[in-house]
Amino acid sequence: MTPGTLEAFIDHLSIPKSCELNKPVFKKLFLDNGVLDIADKTALKDDVDKIRWLYTLKPATINIAGYVDGERDFSEVAVLQVELTSTKRLKRIATFMQRSIPYPLILLFTQSNQVCLSVADKRINQADKEKWVVGDILYTDWIDLAAPTAVQAVFLEDCNINSFSFANFLSFYKSLTDRVIAINCASHSGRYEQGAADNIENKPSEGRLERLRELEKLNLQRTEIANKLKKEKQMGRQVELNTKIKQINDVIEKIRETI
């Protein structure tokens, strides 16, 4: 059954009570610990209503081992709920939050009965072991928990930690990351599938996330060319732009089949 409310969705995650923290996080934490510019501070002040630290998953609270190597420190995973008054600067907020808290974070952004999940690839800064390098930050689209699309409903059902890998916290976190990638791929393919074929014509080693990024880039290029086409008066140039759009469409279709 699809969770219909935020509370039901959080329950559906099935994170044990032993991991529960459920304490407020004050904005001062980010002002003191984060490197926030003026735009970040404005977004924090104007767009963020409340922040709660819902859970801390660590070996003492759940039967999952930490994972630490020269590049990563997945000793524990934190789950935060961030209630927004406005969604327009979501990505900015996610970025400074991921940079400010030195743990792998699962961010649940909420507004009314909608939720957006965000995860990030974090690595240890090789030049300064006390700092983190935040790589890809991934987001789902906003999901109306009372009326999700068909693929969103499958994704929500799939967000139960009992179906995640418990080998260690890196593989646990990757389980959710793979699901976020899968729902983002579904917005292009119409199918929610984990572990889709990991190859594409002439690019056998390219991963699913890279193909998703390529799709996003191609869609942007297509939009830019279409906007130029609307303003173009010269027939020869119109033909050239239409040809480019067709070529991009062909590439997009090939990639869609592989994600």
Image (cartoon, rainbow, N blue to C red):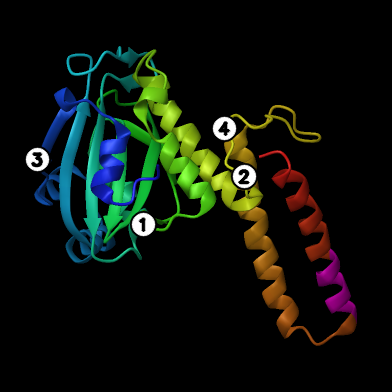
User: Which residue was labeled with disc 2?
Assistant: 191
Residue drawn at the location 26% of the way across and 58% of the way down: 40
Q: Is residue 98 visible?
A: no
Between marks 3 and 2 in the image, the one whose residue lies nearer the viewer: 2
Determine the image quadrant of residue 9: top left
**How far apart are labels 4 and 1 at the CA level?**
24 Å
Provide the secondary structure element on which disc 4 rests.
Answer: loop
Provide the secondary structure element on which disc 2 rests.
Answer: loop
* Prevailing SS of the magenta stretch: helix
Q: x%, y% of residue 134? A: 38, 37
Between marks 2 and 1 in the image, the one whose residue lies nearer the viewer: 1
Q: Is residue 2 above or below residue 129?
A: below
- Label number found at residue 194: 4
Hey, what amino acid is under mark 2?
Answer: Arg
**How far apart are labels 3 and 2 at the CA level?**
37 Å
Provide the secondary structure element on which disc 1 rests.
Answer: loop
Q: Nearer the viewer, residue 168 or 101?
A: 168
* Mark positioned earlier in the residue sequence (2 or 1): 1
Tell me, yes or no, whether the highlighted magenta stretch contains residue 81: no
- Label number found at residue 16: none
Q: Which of 53 and 190 is in front in this view?
A: 190
* Mark positioned earlier in the residue sequence (4 or 3): 3
**How far apart are labels 4 and 3 at the CA level?**
33 Å
* Mark positioned earlier in the residue sequence (1 or 3): 3
User: Which residue was labeled with disc 1?
Assistant: 146
Between marks 1 and 3 in the image, the one whose residue lies nearer the viewer: 1
**How far apart are labels 2 and 4 at the CA level?**
10 Å
Residue drawn at the location 66% of the way across and 69% of the way down: 224
Q: Give the range drawn in magenta.
A: 236-243
